[in-house]
Structure formats: C-alpha cells, structure tokens
Amino acid sequence: MNRNITLFEAPQMEAIEMEGHVLSGPPALDRAALPGLTGNIIGKILPHTEAGEAALLFNLLIAVGSIAGRTRYTLAGNSRHYPNLFGVLVGTSGKGRKGTSWNAFKPILSEIDDAWCNDCRGSGLNSGEGLIYHVRDSTRDKKGEMIEGVTDKRLFVIEEEFASVLKRMKGQNNSLAAVMRDAWDGNDLRSMVRNSPDRSTAPHVSIQAHTTKQELIDLITGTDCQNGFANRFLWIYTERSKYLPDGGAIPMRELLSEISALQAALEKAEQGDEMEIPLSPDAKELWRAVYRDLSEGRPGLIGSVIGRAEAQVRRLALCYSLIAGEGDTSVESLQAALAFWKYCEDSAGWLFGTPFNHPNADRIYDYLRKTPDGATRTEINREFSNHLSRAQMEDALSILQKAGAAYPKREKTGGADSERWFIAGAAK
C-alpha cells in the first residue's frame, strides 16, 4: 500500500504510529476558525455548494484582504504586513471542487465591490515582467510623453493550473518567483530585464492557485522551499464536501444582512490613510504565549514550507479583523487565525511530509534499506548521479545518524580506512 509517512503530528488527525513516525490523514478544520460574521457567511453558503469548508473560508479571507488593499496593516517584528495572501488549494483534479469554492463567492463579492470584481482580477502568470505590467506605474516614453499606468494596484490572481506556473518558473532567466516573493512582501516591483522598464510602487497582489498533490510533489523543488517561495503560500487541502446532483444556488436573500455588514466593515477600512491594526491588550497576551511555538523552526522540507508562521498568522488575523470591522485585533480574531494556520500547517504536513522531512536524507535512507552490505559515500553519491555536494551529503547523513536511522562503520582496506554506512538494525 502506498502510504504517506510523516513526522508531522497533528492531534486532530487520525494517526498511526509506524516505525517511530506518524502516519497521518487529511486535516480537519477547528470551529475556532469560523467566528462571528465569518462563520455566518460560510455557514449559509456551505449547504448550497460541493466545495469544502476550508476552501470557502480561504476564499473569503483572501478576497477581503485583496479588496481592502493597503489601507490597513499589522506589524510582525519590524515589518509591515498588509492583508494580501498567497494560497494554494490542493485537491484531487476535478473532484476537490477548488474552482467551485471561488464561484460560490462571485455574486457576493460583486455586491460588495463591483469595481474590484471587474477590474482587479486576472490569471496567467507567465513572467515577473508580466506580473509587474498589471500593476505598473505611469511612465514616460523616449519622447517624454506620458504612458498611463494602473491606478488601482489591487491585483487578485487566480491560477487554476499552478503546475504550469511552477514549470514556467524553472525556465532560464524567468524572474517570476523573485517578483512573486517581492509582491507578497509588499515591496515595490521592478524587473531587471533590459527591455522591460515597468515598475510598480506600492502593489497589492493576492494569489489564489489550484493544484493536485501529485503535481505538487512532481514539480516543487528543494530550491523553491529553501529560497522562501513556498513559505509565502498558505497550503490548503480541500475536498468535496457533499454531492449535489442538481447543483446548488447561493442563497443571496439569506445573506443580505451578512453582505451589508461585510460591506460596511470594508468601507470603514478604506477610510483615511494607511493605518496599523494593533493587537488588543488581551490578544497581545495571547500572542506572547504562542509566539515561541510559532517561531521555532522545524527540520527539513516541512520547516521550509511553514517557515513564516508568525507573519502568516498576523496577516490572517488582520483579515479576520477586517471582516469583523475591528479597530484592534481581538482575541477571537487571533484565535481564528491560529486555528486556520493550524489547518494550513496540517495540510503542509499531509502534502509534503516524508520520513525525515529532508529530500536527500529520505533518498539515502531508501537506498540504504536496499543495500544490506552498506554503502560508502562514493556509492551513495552515485545514487544522485554524483551531483550531491560534500556539504549536502554531510547534512543528510547527520540527520539520519541523529535520528538513529543509519550509522557509519570504519573498515580497514589496503590503503586508508573506508567509511561505510548501514541502515539501523544491520549487524555492526
């Protein structure tokens, strides 16, 4: 049986201990992630769509964060964080109802901000230059004549084929990954390509993407995880919530009071200049209590994918605060953000989890299991077509040794002693 074995442990998952590791199933969404108005909106939509609850919640949060723009921010460390989110909905192709989750919100968001719905949405991420173009500043041509730019820098990108984006990023000289990282950070954008003079001041880019688990495993690389690209995304496992053979219609009449409340909250947020939404005194106390756990890194692949926990939680809390119309982020909004982040964290464990959460260590471990007589470093490197550097080899073997999964043994030869590595349990 093909099993996903992971060190990532989530209490709400059904888990089976296996050879010292944890075999986990898909995550479950904690009710704390659905407070007040947020819970009312999702609760009224959910019975009328096959989309999953977590996917609906993410679409609400990312849409509100995009519509609000750069009017409000939160501070995490010394950095300003605006409510623009990046996220990937991961589910079975055609059956995860990823697109359905967005379609459920179209009529609601059109009522709230029709201009945003018509002018600020796009798809088709091909290059960094292309992304910048859609939020470009005004500029002058060689004759000094003005070329109009984009006045509304809110850009909401929907990528239903995220695998295609990952493939394009691997192209030589493709700047898309670097520009996307800057866009998430809220930095001004500028391409270094000689014939692409476009730049963007104060962009507000949000990205909602779709993929399947297998596409993700096949295409995302260790570089994507280590360079900070992957951890700028929220990873959201989604699946069909129910079967509606006759389809479903969003009950707009039942949602009139929620739409009115959300519209009022966003109008309030759009007033005035940029303003910080601080934590309330009680929320600040909770933040101090959870900060250490959020900040502590995890080893290997999982640690790289969820490495921006503090910033992601604060952005999510800001989005919850915007929905609630709060001047300060309440304990309830921060608790909701922590609950949804836990779901994203669990999703990442389900999607990326491996025995040692480290691609090289995992591969060496599998190789040694098939090599009962052990293997030298040279023989191990042949498994990697001799492309593993000394530092990478040392790092991977160290992880295996510390985990008690493999050990080295010195062997005398005709010349210098040889080091041979064995799987744990092999005769020493």
Image: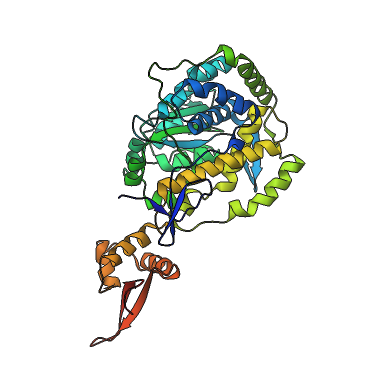
Q: Is residue 69 left or right of residue 159?
A: right
For the C terminus, the quadrant is bottom left
Q: Residue at x 46, y 50 (%)?
A: 15
376, 240: nearer the viewer: 240
Quarter-wise, where is residue 100 in the image?
top left
Residue projecting furthest to the top: 253
**Residue closer to the observer: 269 or 325:** 325
Residue closer to the observer: 235 or 97: 97
Q: Quadrant of residue 173?
A: top left
Count of numbered badges drawn on the protein: 0
Q: What percent of the width, then of the height, locates residue 345?
A: 51, 46
Point out the residue furthest to the right here: 281
> Which residue is more in the foreground, 160 or 365?
365
Where is residue 6 drawn, in percent x and y? 42, 54
Q: Name which residue lies at 23% across and 88% down.
A: 414
Q: Is residue 143 visible?
A: no
For the point 68% across and 47% down, the residue is 287
Farthest-out residue, left: 414
Q: Position of residue 47 (x, y in %)?
A: 50, 22
Q: x%, y% of residue 365? A: 33, 64
Q: Image height check: is 223 above or below 241?
A: below
Q: Which colour scheme appears in the figure?
A: rainbow
Whether residue 94 is visible, yes or no, is: yes
Residue 250 left/right relative to 391? right
Specify whether 266 is left or right of 105: right
**Height in image: 222 above or below 238?**
below
Q: Is residue 135 above or below residue 351?
A: above
